[in-house]
Amino acid sequence: MTSPLPLPHHQLLARTKALLNPGEYTSMATAVLVTGRTQSRIRHMGDDDTLPSRLAGKRTRAYRTSALVRDAYRNGRLLLPDVLRTASGQKLDETDLAHALTTHQAGTWYTLSRRGFMPPDWPSWSAWYAGRKERARALLAEEQRQYSHEAESLAARGLTRRRLWCPDQPLNVFGQYQALRPQLLAEADADVRVLPGRKLAHMEMHDPFPDLEVLPDAVYVRRYTAIGARDGATRITNPDLVATTHDLLGRLYTTHASLLKGSPDERLKVPA
């Protein structure tokens, strides 16, 4: 990948939004937005098959989305998750991160949980992995009381927390374990929704979307050790980048994510 080109944050946001679950092929307008090329150049690339396309009507063509993203990357046009992964900021350990998240006053707090690899060394996970699912559920249920207490504390501070769980499909053993936590959160009246991982596919050609904590004045990009343990976060305070990330998470939460519904067994199936 070449060095990133300067790009106004509103354009970065628009390009990233355009790639939310657009399908295998997409329109000329999206092709122009994603690549930064002119319509004439895109037509030429489609004609010589540099950019795979297909007829989308008598006079219009659609262009392969994955090819558009690759062309954009070749020209250094990154997407929002790429910028967040590489942005400079203050390094916080777990203690300082917890303090920052638990003392903020008012606004909307988004949590994006994308990580689905390197399971944590938690007692509930150990029980689940060992096949002791009832014990795992009992341990997780103890957390439910903490969720209810947190909801009361946040309401008193004027802060609304919205959680997005973004797993891959089909769920592996760890994913099935992870699915229990959103269930318990929902039952504790927390704001939690599920975003299928496929909706981020075109943004993850190089690396997965980072796990995020997004507050009105800062974005916290979570860090992990080589063995998957939490290792604090990078605190980003660039106002434009914070506002852009907050806007994208709001879009994901309100437009692309689904509520958890049905019985506990049905909830293990991620909404399409």
Image (tube, rainbow, N blue to C red):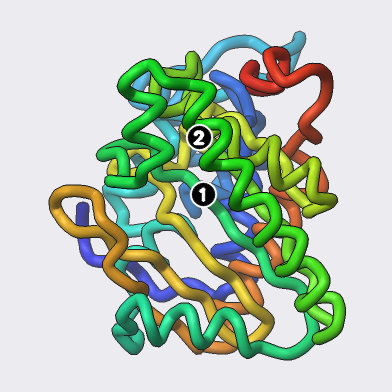
Residue 252 vs residue 202, the one in the foreground: 252
* For residue 242, above or below residue 103: above
Residue under the point 63% across and 77% down: 215
Residue under the point 48% across and 21% down: 133
Q: What residue is pinned by disc 2?
A: 178
Tell me whether the residue at label 1 lies in contact with that at label 2, contact meaning CB atoms closer than 8 angstroms: yes
Q: Residue 187: percent from the left, percent from the top?
A: 80, 41
Question: In the rendered image, which quarter is residue 141 located in?
Answer: top right
Q: Quadrant of the C terminus?
A: top right
Q: What residue is pinned by disc 1?
A: 113
Does residue 213 appear in this view? yes
Helix, strand or loop at label 2? It is: helix
Residue under the point 40% across and 44% down: 115
Q: Earlier in the sequence, mark 1 or mark 2?
A: 1
Residue under the point 43% across and 80% down: 97
Q: Is residue 50 left or right of residue 26?
A: left
Q: CA distance from mark 1 to mark 2?
A: 10 Å
Categorize mark 2 by other alpha carbons within 10 Å: few (<14), some (14-19), many (20+): some
Residue 131 vs residue 241, the one in the foreground: 131
Does residue 47 appear in this view? no
Q: Residue 194: percent from the left, percent from the top?
A: 67, 36
- Mark 1 or 2: in front is 2
